[in-house]
Image (cartoon, rainbow, N blue to C red):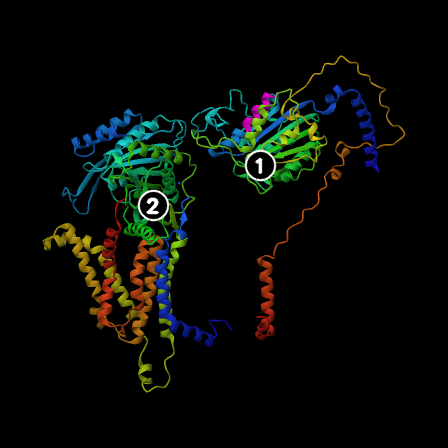
């Protein structure tokens, strides 16, 4: 009943809006995305020299995001190990993403906010939910509001339903989904794009249930994400395949690009990536085709000059004759209707050892009491 | 009723055991030997998943000084920018040295440390080349110095690299290791080390005696048959393939025809060489002493067998550089792969899980024999016969009849171990022999006396000649042998297996009922001393350079 009222109210509003759009095509783009600022949280979760490629992955996304306009004050960069100054790095103070050392993603103006052992599950979740001690400096906080579009990029070693942090702890997909729900309830984002490049990455976004989340992963459950070529001078693999092709794709994006999310979903097909990248858009309210890449990767505030006059009709009169109760922010969207999550069918397994042993014991006791001669009828 | 507590069933089992005992023992023996030979068959094995001018200068200086040119080495290391330290050591030999007829060996080790430019000094790698007498091994030292210079110019080292030139091969190496780890197990006299790196992660020892090598040989066997981690052998093999150098193990080339008879016998020969080298218990390269300190080490020998395709020293240098870079990237000690294995070829290995059953089958023979004897001992005597009285009179042999031979055997063993060295001086005074001869002759004398013991002492023991008496003694002896062989096989599989191969059949089947002369002859033939002789012959026949 109440839901119906809410829906009807929304429909009326949208109808009015669409009528505007039909008249004023130029103005349409202006109102399509509701965000006013952009944030990025980029996390590399593995340490040790042979995980060089995870740091290079994160730094290449950082580089693209900075190039497209998000400033360091709006980027939270978390790197679990220092590859540029590692003892084994034959080119100190550099982190390369292409072999033959074409592109140094470390650059001169990298600002790492969480470094080394500070990258933990607890810190990551606190950054997302905003529950940090008052003494935390501003550069380590995600100060987003309800009009922020946030890009979250995770890379490292993962498995079915978890991501490994620092070789000693894990974050599960349930924790991540709950963290995003906390963010939604605290109005900490407008729209959120979640990209993960790990083995079995698709398992990490399976449990999301908050609205306005779009997710991309480099491989499905049961698949491994593979690394790109090794560099012989440095001696380790420099990048993972998915992020390598993602970087190539992003290098072609400039602040005025009109490329949308459907192109991003096509990055790194199976022929290039060997694993099958996946994405999830059912929680996202807008059509992915109308979402620009720069809505998340850049910090664009476009200005449109128009010489036409825009006719605004009478202001919308509120519907007075209906009593409506105030809804909390959370209940505005019927999330449970949007997500049709059915409980997964559990595969039938043959009874395991304990049950078998128990039944064998029962049968043996039976035959023992009633005589062994009955046993020969069976065998 | 249970299987073993029901007397009917037990009697049936025991009948089965007594009837089939001898055939089962024979089958087990054949199976054990066949299993061992099968280890070399390729489908059963697993694939293994990894500076000349200076040399001549070194040779010249060595000849000039007549030993180890310590000062020149110190200067050369310093010129390459390493921290140089020396260590003096001296050792009293038990016998005088063959060449110089003296008891005291004095020497100096020289080592240079290349500090990692940016890393803390917690870990180290060692590259060593022994300074041997005469013209041996000069190129190895030259290569070492060349590599030191090359390594000094790189910035990617995360561990300190210690370049060591040790004098008197094993003695110098042992002195250095004892000084480095602050232990003193051999009672040697050495000066403490002034310079140190961190804990040593891996070590390689070089032996190169010619300017041009045609192949590189990998030596793995160390002290008491200990082996380095298989990962080190795989690393060497991987780099050999990458750089394209011919690599061998036990001096034998790789062959691809495992299904032909000659290919199979080639693998068997390689494996037997490894088994015998391991059984001898002595380290077959300077690396063997590192293994006791849990440092994975191997020796790389350059072999020149006058083939067409030659590799020069700089290629060997590249191979070593690649290996050291890989070792540099390690974050922990090598521990992922096997520590107990046999290698029928450089690309295949047999792990302990596969070769232990061969020994297990041989040990089972002894246990079956013991069971058989036990059954015979506890079998009830036949009732009411004419000599029933005689049977009842016969008492079971006392503890003394079993204990006395055991004690005497132990005493003989202890005498064999201790007497030759303790009474060396006494032997020299009374007999016109040299020190070495005195030791060997005393050992042979004690051994022969031990062999003749049963003949001399059987009169002293009560209950000796009875049917029960020898059975009890044999039961105890067979079980004891099984335990001893088992313990030996756990520590040094090759030694345990070779001893088991010869001792088990004869121990299982000899009884007083076997013809005496034949059994005496076979016993002597299969005793450990003769086994040692046979092994030496076999070893020499298997050995051939590529």
Q: Which mark is residue A298?
A: none
- B259 vs B471, nearest the viewer: B259
Task: Judge left or right: residue B314 versus residue A327.
Answer: left
Q: Does dot 1 land on a helix, a strand or a loop?
A: helix
What is the chain identity of the residue bearing mark 1?
A
Image location (x, y in percent) of residue A118:
54, 31
Range drawn in magenta: A58-68
Q: Check chain identity for marks 1 and 2: say if they share one.
A: no
The part of the image, by quadrant, that contains residue A77 is: top right
Secondary structure of the residue carrying tag 2 is: loop
Q: Mark 2 = which residue?
A: B254
Q: Is residue A103 above or below residue B455?
A: above
* In the image, residue A61 lies in the stretch drawn in magenta: yes
- The residue tagged 1 is A270
Location of residue B466 by image quarter:
bottom left
Q: Residue furthest bottom?
A: B386
Q: Name the residue furthest right.
A: A321
Give the left or right position of residue B131, taking residue A32 as reference: left
Label 1 – label 2 distance at C-alpha: 40 Å
Q: Which quarter of the rendering shows the C terminus of chain B? A: top left
């Amino acid at each position: 009943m109440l839901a119906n009222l809410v829906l009807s109210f929304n429909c009326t509003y949208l109808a009015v809006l669409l009528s505007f759009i039909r008249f004023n095509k130029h103005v349409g783009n202006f109102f399509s995305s509701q965000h006013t600022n952009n944030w990025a949280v980029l996390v590399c979760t593995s340490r040790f020299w042979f995980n060089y490629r995870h740091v290079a992955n994160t730094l290449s996304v950082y580089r693209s995001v900075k190039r497209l306009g998000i400033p360091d004050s709006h980027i939270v960069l978390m790197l679990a190990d220092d590859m540029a100054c590692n003892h084994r790095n034959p080119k100190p103070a550099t982190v390369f993403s292409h072999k033959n050392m074409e592109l140094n993603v470390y650059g001169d103006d990298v600002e790492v906010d969480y470094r080394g052992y500070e990258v933990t599950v607890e810190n990551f979740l606190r950054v997302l939910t905003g529950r940090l001690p008052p003494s935390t400096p501003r550069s380590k906080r995600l100060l987003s509001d309800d009009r922020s579009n946030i890009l979250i990029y995770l890379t490292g070693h993962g498995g079915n339903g978890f991501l490994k942090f620092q070789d000693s702890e894990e974050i599960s997909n349930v924790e991540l989904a709950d963290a995003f729900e906390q963010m939604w309830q605290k109005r900490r984002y407008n729209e959120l794009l979640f990209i993960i490049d790990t083995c079995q990455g698709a398992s990490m976004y399976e449990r999301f249930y908050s609205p306005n989340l779009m997710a991309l992963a480099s491989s499905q459950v049961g698949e491994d994400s593979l690394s790109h070529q090794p560099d012989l001078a440095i001696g380790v693999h420099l990048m993972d395949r998915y992020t390598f092709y993602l970087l190539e794709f992003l290098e072609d994006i400039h602040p005025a690009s009109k490329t949308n999310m459907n192109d991003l979903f096509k990055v790194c097909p199976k022929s290039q990536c060997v694993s099958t990248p996946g994405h999830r858009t059912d929680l996202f309210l807008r059509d992915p085709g109308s979402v620009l890449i720069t809505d998340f990767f850049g910090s664009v505030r476009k200005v449109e000059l128009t010489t036409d006059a825009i006719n605004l009709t009478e202001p919308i009169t509120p519907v007075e004759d209906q009593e409506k109760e105030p809804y909390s922010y959370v209940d505005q969207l019927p999330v449970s209707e949007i997500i049709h999550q059915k409980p997964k069918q559990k595969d039938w397994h043959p009874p395991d050892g304990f049950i078998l042993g128990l039944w064998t014991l029962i049968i043996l006791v039976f035959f023992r009491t009633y005589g062994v001669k009955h046993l020969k009828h069976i065998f | 009723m249970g299987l073993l507590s029901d007397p009917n069933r037990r009697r049936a089992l025991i009948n089965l055991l007594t009837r089939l005992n001898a055939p089962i023992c024979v089958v087990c023996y054949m199976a054990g030997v066949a299993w061992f030979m099968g280890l070399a068959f390729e489908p059963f094995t697993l694939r293994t998943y990894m500076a000349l001018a200076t040399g001549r200068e070194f040779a010249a200086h060595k000849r000039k000084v007549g030993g180890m040119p310590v000062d020149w080495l110190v200067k050369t290391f310093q010129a390459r920018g390493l921290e140089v330290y020396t260590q003096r050591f001296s050792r009293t030999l038990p016998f005088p040295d063959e060449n110089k007829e003296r008891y005291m060996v004095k020497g100096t080790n020289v080592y240079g440390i290349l500090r990692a430019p940016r890393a803390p000094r917690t870990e180290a790698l060692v590259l060593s080349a022994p300074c041997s007498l005469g013209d041996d091994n000069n190129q190895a030292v030259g290569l070492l110095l060349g590599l030191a210079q090359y390594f000094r110019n790189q910035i990617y080292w995360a561990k300190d690299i210690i370049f060591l030139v040790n004098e008197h091969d094993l003695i110098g190496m042992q002195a250095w290791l004892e000084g480095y780890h602050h232990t003193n197990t051999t009672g040697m006299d050495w000066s403490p080390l002034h310079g140190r790196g961190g804990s040593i992660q891996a070590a390689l020892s070089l032996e190169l005696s010619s300017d041009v090598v045609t192949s590189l040989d990998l030596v793995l066997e160390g002290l008491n048959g200990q082996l380095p981690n298989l990962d080190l052998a795989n690393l060497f093999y991987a780099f050999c393939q990458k750089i394209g150098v011919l690599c061998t193990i036990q001096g034998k080339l790789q062959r691809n025809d495992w299904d032909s008879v000659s290919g199979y016998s080639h693998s068997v020969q390689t494996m037997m060489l490894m088994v015998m080298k391991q059984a001898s218990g002595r380290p077959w390269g300077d690396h063997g002493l590192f293994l006791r300190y849990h440092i994975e080490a191997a020796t790389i020998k350059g072999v020149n067998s006058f083939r067409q395709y030659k590799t020069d020293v700089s290629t060997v240098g590249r191979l070593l550089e690649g290996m050291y870079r890989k070792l540099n990237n390690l974050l922990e000690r090598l521990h992922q792969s096997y520590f107990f294995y046999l290698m029928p070829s450089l690309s295949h290995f047999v792990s302990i899980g596969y070769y232990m059953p061969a020994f297990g089958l041989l040990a089972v023979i002894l246990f079956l024999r013991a069971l058989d004897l036990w059954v015979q001992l506890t079998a009830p005597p036949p009732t009411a016969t004419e000599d029933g009285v005689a049977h009842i009179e016969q008492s079971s042999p006392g503890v003394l009849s079993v204990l006395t031979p055991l004690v005497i055997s132990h005493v003989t063993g202890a005498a064999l171990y201790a007497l030759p060295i303790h009474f060396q001086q006494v032997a020299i005074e009374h007999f016109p022999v040299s020190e070495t001869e005195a030791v060997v002759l005393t050992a042979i004398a004690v051994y022969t006396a031990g062999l003749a013991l049963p003949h001399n002492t059987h009169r002293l023991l009560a209950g000796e000649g009875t049917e029960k008496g020898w059975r009890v003694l044999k039961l105890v002896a067979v079980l004891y042998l099984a335990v001893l062989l088992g313990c030996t096989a756990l520590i040094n599989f090759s030694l345990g297996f070779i001893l088991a191969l010869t001792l088990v059949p004869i121990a299982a089947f000899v009884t007083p009922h076997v013809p005496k002369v034949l059994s005496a002859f076979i016993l002597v033939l299969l005793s450990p001393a003769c086994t040692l002789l046979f092994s030496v012959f076999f070893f020499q026949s298997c050995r051939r350079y590529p």
